[in-house]
Amino acid sequence: MANPAPPPRTPRLAPPTWLTTGLRPQPAQVPWPAVARASIALAAPLAVGFATERPAYGALVSMGALSGVIGDTADAYRMRVFNIAVPQLFGALGVTLGALVFGQGWLAVAALTLIALVSGMISSIGAVASVSGLLLLLNAVVGAGLPMPDPWWKAPLLLGLGGVVVLTLTLLGWPLRGGQPERAAVAGTYRAIADLFEAAGTDAYDEKRQAVTASLNQSYDLVLGRRARQHGRAPTLVRLLAQLNVVIPMAEAAPAAHLAARRFHRPLPPEVPAAVRDLADAVETGRTGDPDLRLPEARRPSEKAVEASVRYAATVVHQAEHSPYQAFNAAKGADRLGRPAALRVRMRRAARGVLLSGASWRYGLRLALCIGLSQALVSLIAVPRSYWVALTVTFVMKPDFGSVFSRAVLRAFGTAAGLLVAAPILAALPRGWGDVPVMLVLAALIPAFSAKGYAFQTAAITPVILLLSDLLNHQGFHLVLPRLYDSLVGCAIALVAGDLLWPESWHTRVADRLADAVEDTAAYVNLAFGAPSRTGGGGGDAEPEHHGGNDDHGNAGDQGTRVRARRKLYRDMSSVRSEFQRALTEPPPAGDLAAAWWPLTIAVERIVDATTAARVRVDHGAPAPHPAEVALVERQLRELAEGLRSSEVLVEVRADLSGDEDGVLAPLRQEVRAARAIATPSPNAATTPSPSAVTTVPEGSGTTASSPPETGSSRSPGSAPDPTSGPVPDPPRDGGSAP
């Protein structure tokens, strides 16, 4: 296979890729229901405020609604209640604490610094905790910087009322669409599996497999999240869970079908993906009855695995109801990733994770340092309405929302664009009823622009906040330039004190995350074939000695363990991809280092696929591999993991992997060779790349070198995995948009 032509080099005077990526709008559909909710939720309180001659009260309610609009990111209605209500409680606490230290000088500095530490630490718990920590600090900053109405409880009550408005508008469709998000998600997973079967044997397979992983993650999170105790009492949920569980055998059969299609040039017949798409329609519409599958005769083990998995799925999908016994089995067999434990257990785990996690303390201290510096600066220098500096720092210093460096730069651009929109409104339009239609339009832009990227979201939020702030402090057009200066100061503080001063900011964490994934992959290989672990670090109980095909009764427990281990691996690889999305938006050297690791990420995913394919072939009649072959592959993977942890650059290792070239592990050995062949030309290649550097690969491994995607500098840091698995796709690019 010919190597793809390298992309054109970036012109010398062109802006860097990490910047242009963030400024380029992401392809996304406009969420029209969210647009309508945002318009009503932010404009209606203003209308009520003007009608009752209490515009400041209306502005506070709209501020609370703004927080609810930004936090409404879930799909399932029950999860949306949680995602909106819990952060609002933290926001109410924040504004109360902030109002208590309003105008208190250095006491306010100390209080906000402490709140920032707590906000940063709880943000490490999860998505809802992250938004809760954000609102805790944001509202504390607003309370400490703007005069709030007396008595003390009025401001939190009004802000909370804004969240209630958003929650009420959100839940209006629950009686009619209560289970639709979950059904649509499970049906989408079936369609993703159909696309995966259709792509078997083609270069599009890797992309479709990643789509299946993302869809499975979303579906399990929706179906199991917050509702693990309802299996026996909710027949619809039980049925959806059973339909989702039978996707796993199809996902496991896909790698075997892909490798067979590559090797024998025989893709799956079109009847297979068509049958799965029909199952997706049945899931979405609730259709039951006898399944009518017309699949061609399967001959090879991989084809038999696909046929068996599709027929099994059809039986479950078309089954009308599930008995309590089946409900119990569905609960037992469910993928437990994402399923919450008891509330008491989760709270204990969260508290232990926050207090004992080094990453939690580091982020909390970084955020506290930045907030403390911003508040100290505006206490020493007379800056009117200086709360905007701390607000900017709070928005930028959210590492789970993207790269701190790129967010600081993008926020400066977004704020400038938002001020250009706000300036004529504040200058020409007097405060009054005219603000209501203006808010209808500006509020609608927030969900529409948020999907396009962080800079676009900032540009949409800035004029809304300025308009609401003017209703509280009546500064009009004079707000514009000070807000620009404050934003630039806040971005500078976040860049220096929150990013550049911390050594870890100059290094990507991809290597450590990849090393963990490779070690888990070694444990998965051990688990799949029952070879005794050489290090004691296997990721689960090994299978009993078993080399004679499928034994449903003897290996049922081990099969469930393998499924969970594989699902965990793909979830971990999704996290690694998210880490890439953050690292690739960093300037050199971190961005270049992340791009250099990209081929290895693809190689690790293919190793997992090859392992699953080999296990499926054994389950459907192929001879099992010798334990010595399994042990050799496992040892090579563990050595690779140790090498990743000990070096920041990729060093080529010529793996000596011998074995039966006609056995089930031959494709797996090929993928391991490809992973170990990825190299950098010199120890300094990641930071001082050479345009003429050439990557070498082991003889006989079947791998070829390919040019990595451009990231603003000329380099060739890695080789691609086996060409029989397709070319390495470009690394994901993300603008760092907030949820």
Image (cartoon, rainbow, N blue to C red):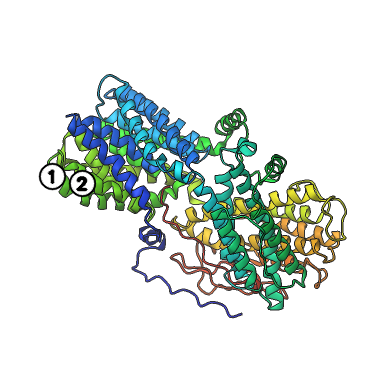
* Residue 318 located left or right of residue 666: left
Q: Looking at the image, which residue is at 58% across and 66% down?
A: 195
Q: Is residue 636 above or below residue 544?
A: below
How many numbered discs sit on the rendered protein? 2
Point out the residue furthest to the front here.
Answer: 289
Q: Which mark is residue 376?
A: none
Identity, as a three-letter code, of the amino acid under mark 1: Leu
Q: Quadrant of the N terminus?
A: bottom right
Q: Looking at the image, which residue is at 19% across and 29% down?
A: 52
As measured in the structure, the alpha-carbon distance from the residue carrying label 1 to the one carrying label 2 is 10 Å
Determine the image quadrant of residue 337: top right
Percent position of residue 629, x then y: 82, 62
Percent position of residue 526, x then y: 78, 54
Q: Which mark is residue 429?
A: 1
Q: Looking at the image, which residue is at 80% across and 64% down?
A: 620
Determine the image quadrant of residue 88: top left
Q: Looking at the image, which residue is at 30% across and 32% down?
A: 142
Q: Which mark is residue 438?
A: 2
State the residue in front, 735 or 536: 735
Comes first in the chain, label 1 or label 2: 1
Which SS class for mark 1? Answer: loop
Q: Is residue 155 above or below residue 583?
A: above
Identity, as a three-letter code, of the amino acid under mark 2: Val
Which SS class for mark 2? Answer: helix
Percent position of residue 593, x then y: 52, 59
* Residue 481 located left or right of residue 294: left
* Residue 627 located left or right of residue 49: right
Percent position of residue 457, x then y: 34, 50
- Mark 1: give few (<14), some (14-19) or many (20+) Cα within 10 Å: few
Can residue 234 be seen by looking at this rendering? yes
State the residue in front, 400 or 494: 400
Can residue 653 be seen by looking at this rendering? no
